[in-house]
Image (cartoon, rainbow, N blue to C red):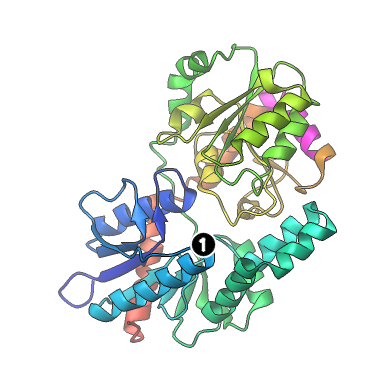
Amino acid sequence: MTGDREMRLALIRQRHTPFGGAERFLDRAMGALRARGVAITLIARRWEGGCDGLETVRCDPWHLGRWWRDVAFARCVHARLAERRFDLVQSHERIPGCDLYRAGDGVHAEWLEQRGRARGRVARWLDGINPFHRHLLNQERLLFEHADLKAVICNSRMVRAEILARFRIAPEKLVVIYSGVDLERFHPETRARERDAARAGWGIAPHETLLLFVGSGFERKGVPALLTALAGLDRATRLVVVGRDKAQGRMEGLARRLGVADRVLFTGGRRDVVPCYAAADAVVLPTLYDPFPNVALEAMAMGLPLVTTFKCGAVDLIDHGVNGLLGDALDLATLTRNLQSLDDAAYRVALGRAARETVVGLSLETMSARLMELYQGLLTRGAGC
């Protein structure tokens, strides 16, 4: 609160959909903060659900192409902010000049570096001269080094270290606040209760090991590597890919070429992913780069083993072989071995139990309390737009 009235918080996100991890974070954060009496205004280009009862302001100027879209949106946001007064403005987009930035998308320069490892020389050169990438890199620098920036919310220690290594920014501005997870909704008992029905709905036999991938951005999150690894696993291992992505057709083609199409199901986006977790034996995110996906927290809260990489922010929480499994995104042999080890049901159970214990302190209430502590501290020091 600010004195005897509600805190007024503006949240900025270009597009709000029911399927994206960043949007799921926003939904959860907004709900938790509103429960604490914070008045929230969402400024967005467009949204699809998740905003019932929430004040929304549309910023959707005409544009042509990604660069123009981002520039026009940023200008529109600043115009709307000039019309109203908020105690704090928190952007989830690379827009310089706001009080807070949540680095949920990580560091674009780091993503390009990691993607470059997996691509040929020509593709890396094209990334280097791509005007949109150059625009984002410039926006990042302006954002992180802007005099008006009061704090950056990092969703992992990995991202905090990347920002410190690349930009001139005071370390005290970088605050790690992990996303919260609904520990009652995502619970091992839910898996036990819904497992048989969820697997039957997909035609998964009780004896089959079911690997689950959840997310959009199939290239970035490692679906090609996962399909390739699947080809080296026992035929009793199945894979379900949940997520809406324009690359789905290409991934289905790759599955056919690898001879695993009969063991892979692409479901598209799902609003409710709990039944997906209930059916699964493990969640696999062999990502090239991911700051910290909500999927990782949800899987661990459900008591599922998480198989991921050193460039996923979940590495903050994973003790390899104890509560999850790790490897390099380009190390296909290690990924295959990690997945083969999950044929041992007792090992899967032990990993999943430890995973649940790891995240029991990362509730939505803990997240909102950390956010409120940060906001109050900034207001006490006289922050505001």
The residue located at (61%, 64%) in the rendering is: 159
Residue 365 vertical position relative to residue 187 in the rendered view, above or below:
below
**Circle 1 SS class:** loop
From the viewer's perspective, tell me whether residue 116 is left or right of residue 65: right
From the viewer's perspective, tell me whether residue 102 is left or right of residue 222: left
Residue 55 vertical position relative to residue 224 in the rendered view, above or below:
below
Along the line of sight, the residue nearer the viewer: 135 or 208: 135
Span shown in magenta? 334-347
Residue 310 x, y percent position in the rendering = 72, 52
The residue located at (47%, 78%) in the rendering is: 96
From the viewer's perspective, tell me whether residue 305 is left or right of residue 148: right
Along the line of sight, the residue nearer the viewer: 105 or 373: 105
Quarter containing the C terminus = bottom left
Q: Which residue is mark 1?
A: 65
| Residue 73 visible, this orientation | yes
Along the line of sight, the residue nearer the viewer: 26 or 325: 26
Q: Is residue 156 highlighted in magenta?
A: no
Residue 304 quadrant: top right
Instruction: Inspect the image, locate mark 1, and give the three-letter code of the amino acid beneath it.
Output: Gly
Residue 109 quadrant: bottom right
Residue 83 quadrant: bottom left
Residue 259 x, y percent position in the rendering = 76, 22
Residue 293 x, y percent position in the rendering = 55, 49
